[in-house]
Amino acid sequence: MGAVFALVDGNNFYVSCERVFNPHLEGKPVVVLSNNDGCIVARSQEARALGIRMGAPFFEAKHFVQSHGLIWLSSNYTLYGDMSARLMALLGELSPHQEIYSIDECFLDLTGIRSDLLAQAQAMRKRIKHYLGLPTCIGIGSSKTLAKLANHIAKKHPDYKGVFSWQHCNRLEEDALMSSIEVSEVWGVGRRLTIKLNQLGIYSVCDLKYASTSLIRKRFGVVLERTVNELNGVSCLDLEETHDEHLVRKHQIISSKSFGKPVHHLPELQEAVVSYISRAAEKLRQQQSFCSHLLVYIRTNPFAQHREQYAKSITIPLITGKDDKRQLAELASQGLQKIYCAGYAYKKAGVMLLGLYPAHQAQDDLFCTPPERTRSHRLMQLMDQLNHTYGSNTLRLAGAGLRPRWTMRSLQRSPNYTTAWNELAQAYANR
DNA sequence: TCTGGGGTCCTAGGACCC
DNA sequence: TCTGGGGTCCTAGGACCC
């Protein structure tokens, strides 16, 4: 018996999370914005119907607030993250093998489950709606790529009531359905590949499914070749299981943000970089890693084409791996001084921690005495603990600034209904 | 006025090794 | 005239994902 995968995801996830605690948002056009209230990152069905594009800058859609009662919200990742954890815990009950693919999506390995999968999937959707108030869709297929595509079909065609499985199609039905879907909908086929595939006469999912694998490999490499195989039901991508969130080690950690207002001077940029590196170092310790390289970058606003642009980055190798935010902040600050150029209006800065490896494999500096290391470790642990208990930034590096004016805009953020007792009551006020 | 943040994988090419 | 074969590691850049 071949493999069976399911892909489950939340419909308009961010908007749905907001609606759970604020029923007034139901039935209305709602969008959730990215950091700085810049771009549209989630749209309700009603907002889509207005023709609002995913990823579009908000100012392009702002007129709908007046004309169509469009409601906009700043993103509240604390809320979405917590709702996501609850969603994933429920879904984990469907199968012991689960890959959490993004904040609102997971793959499940259903291989070998004998009972009626469609019925089980429907029951799970109801359970999630009942327990969490979140609408979901489920796609089932014999490869991850097919499960993804099935999910897309479940979303587009209400007749399927939120669940679609390729297992209930014969080959003719399958091909007919695939012919009706554009190749760009396939997982792993983005904008550039779509253009190149179209030039070869490949327009629909079905065209890609029957394309020659050797040609695809020669022209596009092994990644797309795998996709073609997966469309043919040959599973090439395994589940990447994620039992314990803390054991999933990232290969790089990024912390970057656009500024609410342009920043001109070095001291302010330094505050930003120190605060970003602090955040990155926290993530680094959370996954019990050290980093061997550190990258700092700054840039002006690329959309302000009429102004002269400047963007520069610097990579700093660390002689010994580090996870102490004081040392990292010092190095990042020095790096920043090297790339800073006066006279520009900076819009964004960021740091990346690279060359990550498990902390227990760290090598000591010949000149660093063990007590120093222990002290550093204990201090960092204490800071992390305090910030966890009393809220992030309770104890922070002075270099991050006391009252920075560059912080991002977030004018319409909803309360943290599920993670802060003092904000919970607002859910009742909304009723 | 106003355009996000955080990741992954693969490939090509250069430096270096025996 | 004419200069091997096989390998590793690292980095930059490009493509994709949500």
Image (tube, coloured by chain):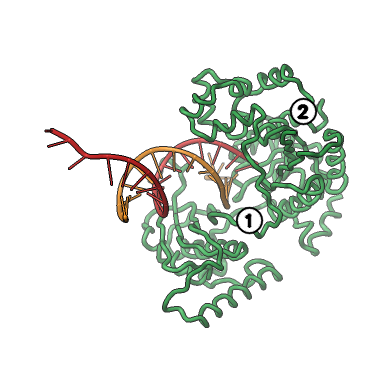
Chain colours: A green, B orange, C red
Q: Position of residue A243 (x, y in %)?
A: 71, 54
Q: Which residue is depicted at the point 62% across and 39% down?
A: A237
Name the quadrant containing residue A342. Answer: bottom left
Name the quadrant containing residue A395. Answer: bottom right
Q: Is residue A150 left or right of residue A198?
A: right
Q: Quick one: label 2 or label 1, which is nearer the N terminus?
A: 2
Name the quadrant containing residue C10. Answer: bottom left
The kind of residue tagged 1 is: Val
Q: Nearer the viewer, residue A229 or A198?
A: A229
Measured Cα–Cα span from mark 2 to mark 1: 32 Å
The secondary structure type at the circle numbered 1 is: loop
Q: Position of residue A404 (x, y in %)?
A: 55, 64
Q: Are marks 2 and 1 in contact (CB under 8 Å)?
A: no
Q: How many marks?
A: 2
Q: Position of residue A8 (x, y in %)?
A: 74, 40
Instruction: Return the residue at label 1.
Output: A248
Instruction: Return the residue at label 2.
Output: A167
Neighbours of disc 2 within 10 Å: few (<14), some (14-19), many (20+): few
The secondary structure type at the circle numbered 2 is: helix
State whether residue A45 appears in this view. Answer: yes
